[in-house]
Image (cartoon, rainbow, N blue to C red):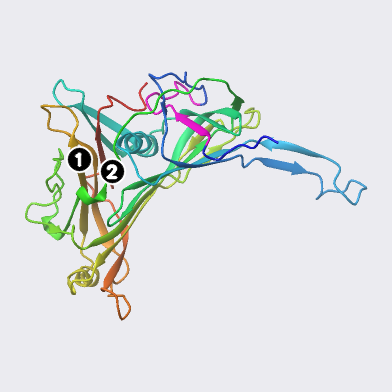
Amino acid sequence: MITFKGWAQDLMLSLFKREATYNAGVTMSSTNACLMRGYEVSVDWDDEVVTDKGEITGSEFGTDQELNTQRVKITYKEPRAKPNTLAGLGALVLGSITTTQDGALTAYRHRITPVAAGSELRSIQAEHRAGGVQYAYRGIKGNTLKIAGEAGGYASVEAELIGSGTRTSSATSFVSAISESWLRLAICRVWLETGTAISISPTLTQEAQNISTGTPVDLRVRLKSFEWTYNNNIDAQLGFGGTGVAQDLDYGRRSVDLKFSLLFAGATELTYFLEQRPVAIEFDLAGATIATGGTLRFGFQLIVPRFKIKKAPLPVGGVGDILSCDFECDVQSDGTNPVSILEAYNARSGYILA
């Protein structure tokens, strides 16, 4: 008997090219798509299967069954994230991306923010091969994006991708992966600011704080872990005449969730909770210079311009522990900036292009 191994899988996403119209597909070439590496993936066909078991048929048992609607969900995770993945999935999920070049060098800044309310999310194509079976999935939109990490480790990225349900057996050759280093949290800076001192720089600078008119609190030593999640709450638009697949995917009321843990250092943050002060936080990971002679460095910046602490960050820990405190945050709009700003830096010139 021939057995198929779990490591023998391939996944490519057209992160560089979007569908011209929803569910039209994308040519999976090296110009449009990239091969993913170092990931965990789950591909689920959550189809709706209809039977007649709830109706009177004259039979004790069911007599018929058919496939009514097709659904595809891809859950993707990189335990050690890379800038290309962060930029591509970030642009797909949040929806708005602006790319600027570092002079004439092969180095780029990708500013990613939530698409304006009422504007549509873009869609891509995915191809997955496992167990000798390869399928192309069209009409893929990004539902959720999570960036997380723990002290001493790496930033991880996780995304839930939802397709129209269209799937076709494929023999397309897989393109090459982009070679990049992992995003190591040992080189990540973290700042926190509160109240009227919060000020978000219109142009972010790597290796410098971008959230304060003064001197924000440096959290590098105290930060134990963090988790930021963006959710589009996507709903399938089935309509009529769609032959059993979604004719579009639209977001609902979007949400952002932020959690982090710090080593306990007194009642300062508890005061933030009691006084319900607005708080801003910035994560800034800058690695090696992308291009010789340039200023941009491989990495990312993540800024949440306004949140309030929604549960008292009291000290916790056992007899032999160093006390810590956990933060659960209500991410809000400050009326000026996007609710979250993600910037990714690498040598790729653009994502989700027309």
- Image coordinates of residue 177 in percent, x first then y, are 39, 28
- Badge 2 or badge 1: first in the primary sequence: 2
- Image coordinates of residue 303 in percent, x first then y, are 23, 48
Residue sitting nearer the eye, 295 or 250 = 295
Among the 4 quarters of the image, the one containing residue 197: bottom left
Residue 223 shown left or right of residue 128 in the figure:
left
Residue sitting nearer the eye, 81 or 168 = 81
Residue sitting nearer the eye, 306 or 300 = 300
Which amino acid type is marked by label 2?
Answer: Leu
Q: Is residue 20 magenta?
A: yes
Look at 31% across and 81% down and name the residue there.
319
Residue 91 shown left or right of residue 207 in the figure:
right
Magenta region, residue range: 8-22
Distance (Cα) linking label 2 and label 1: 8 Å
Image quarter (top left, top right, bottom left or bottom right) of the C terminus:
top left
Position above or below: 29 against 310: above
Disc 1 secondary structure class: strand
Image quarter (top left, top right, bottom left or bottom right) of the N terminus:
top right
For mark 1, what is the residue?
287
Position above or below: 32 against 301: above
Look at 39% across and 47% down and name the residue there.
79
Q: How many marks?
A: 2
Mark 1: give few (<14), some (14-19) or many (20+) Cα within 10 Å. Answer: many
Among the 4 quarters of the image, the one containing residue 91: top left
Which amino acid type is marked by label 1?
Answer: Gly
For mark 2, what is the residue?
183
Residue sitting nearer the eye, 3 or 102 = 3
- Residues tagged 2 and 1 counted as in contact (Cβ below 8 A): yes
